[in-house]
Amino acid sequence: MAMLDIEYRYSAEPPSDLDIRRKSVKEMENYIRSLVLEMQMADISVGFKMIKKDDLDRNTVLINGKTVNQILNGLQLVMLEPDEDSCGCNSPSKPITNIGRSELDWNDEHIEDISDVLMKNAIAKMYADMEADRIM
């Protein structure tokens, strides 16, 4: 079974004057921990470490030694349009939380701004690559 190792390396709090999704290191830690918990509940082997490094030029997340930017580089991600049958018309409506901001839009200079869609795609890509390597 593939093992994912996720590291959140940080040197400082993200700038408070930016419009980013997670405003602090603690908020980013909580976000990653909830992703790790989801994966563990799905029986995926995953570990998580937070590492404070004073010599970093910017905060970053590594998955099995690769940064999220490296993993996402070269992937073509598109948001799918919902089918008529899956429009959710028969289910209760959900509040709109991020008006005007695409899930594919993020300030890649600040990992704390990464969207859930992009983070989960990076994790899925690394997991799929590891599984492919294991099978071969």
Image: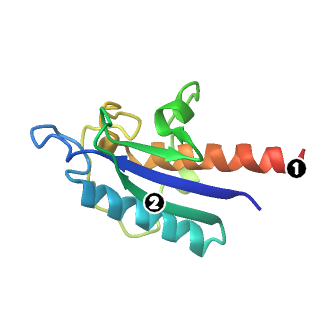
Under mark 2, the amino acid is Lys
**Observer-nearest of 12 and 17:** 12
Which residue occupies the extreme top position in the image?
A: 74
- Quadrant containing the C terminus is top right
Which residue occupies the extreme right position in the image?
A: 136
Under mark 1, the amino acid is Ile
- Where residue 11 appears, as percent x and y from the top left, is 27, 45
Is any atom of residue 117 visible in this view? yes
Residue at the location (35% across, 31% down)? 108
Q: On the picture, is 61 further left or further right than 134?
A: left
Residue bearing the label numbered 1: 135
Which residue occupies the extreme bottom position in the image?
A: 41
Question: Against 34, is 16 above or below?
Answer: above
Q: Residues within 10 Å of mark 2 (few under 14, many from 20)?
A: some
Which residue occupies the extreme left position in the image?
A: 17
**Observer-nearest of 75 and 88:** 75
Residue at the location (53% across, 33% down)? 72
Residue bearing the label numbered 2: 49
